Image (cartoon, rainbow, N blue to C red):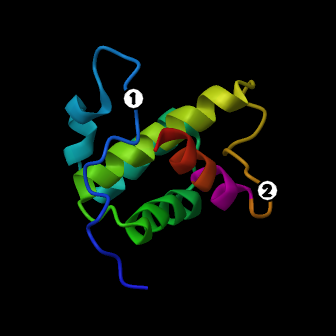
């Protein structure tokens, strides 16, 4: 499947905070530094991070800046939904759970 830039800037997210994801300095970090920041904020491992990034790319969000905004919005929504103490080192989705959550995220924010 070849990704096309069809969903580049469509606002899937509705910023809840005064400082929206679009203004974060983290979006311009090199990939490894951005991942490390995501890991610290959201307890996401490298495999999950890469899968989410790839999923949004295949969905059609080609621009890295726009894709990172969506990635952060997704992780933020997952963090809010879980609302659990840090019982695990990383966020867990279960078998097929990540894809289901990504689809729900897109469908609920379209």
Q: Which residues are magenta?
A: 97-102
Counting from the top left corner in percent of width and height, residue 75 is at: 52, 40
Looking at the image, which residue is at 36% across and 84% down? 2
Q: Are marks 1 and 2 in contact (CB under 8 Å)?
A: no
Residue sitting nearer the eye, 32 or 28: 28
Where's the N terminus, which quadrant? bottom left
Helix, strand or loop under label 1: loop
* Residue of label 1: 14
Going by the image, does 108 lie left or right of 67?
A: right
Question: Which quadrant of the structure image shows residue 59?
Answer: bottom left
Counting from the top left corner in percent of width and height, residue 102 is at: 58, 53
Looking at the image, which residue is at 27% across and 50% down? 66
* Residue of label 2: 94
For the image, the number of numbered tags is 2
Residue furthest toward the bottom? Answer: 1
How far apart are labels 1 and 2 at the CA level?
Answer: 27 Å
Counting from the top left corner in percent of width and height, residue 61 is at: 33, 61
Looking at the image, which residue is at 51% across and 49% down? 106
Which of discs 1 and 2 lies nearer the camera? The answer is: 1
Residue sitting nearer the eye, 64 or 34: 64
Helix, strand or loop under label 2: loop
Q: Residues within 10 Å of mark 1 (few under 14, many from 20)?
A: few
Of marks 1 and 2, which one's residue comes earlier in the chain?
A: 1
């Amino acid at each position: 499947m070849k990704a096309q830039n069809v969903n580049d800037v469509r606002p899937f997210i509705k910023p809840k905070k005064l400082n929206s994801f679009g203004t974060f300095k983290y979006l311009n970090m090199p990939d490894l530094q951005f991942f490390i920041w995501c890991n610290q904020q959201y307890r996401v491992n490298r495999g999950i991070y890469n899968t989410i990034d790839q999923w949004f790319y295949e969905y059609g969000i080609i621009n890295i800046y726009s894709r990172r905004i969506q990635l952060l919005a997704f992780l933020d929504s997952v963090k809010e939904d879980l609302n659990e103490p840090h019982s695990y080192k990383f966020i867990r989705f279960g078998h097929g759970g990540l894809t289901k959550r990504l689809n729900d995220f897109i469908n609920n924010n379209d």
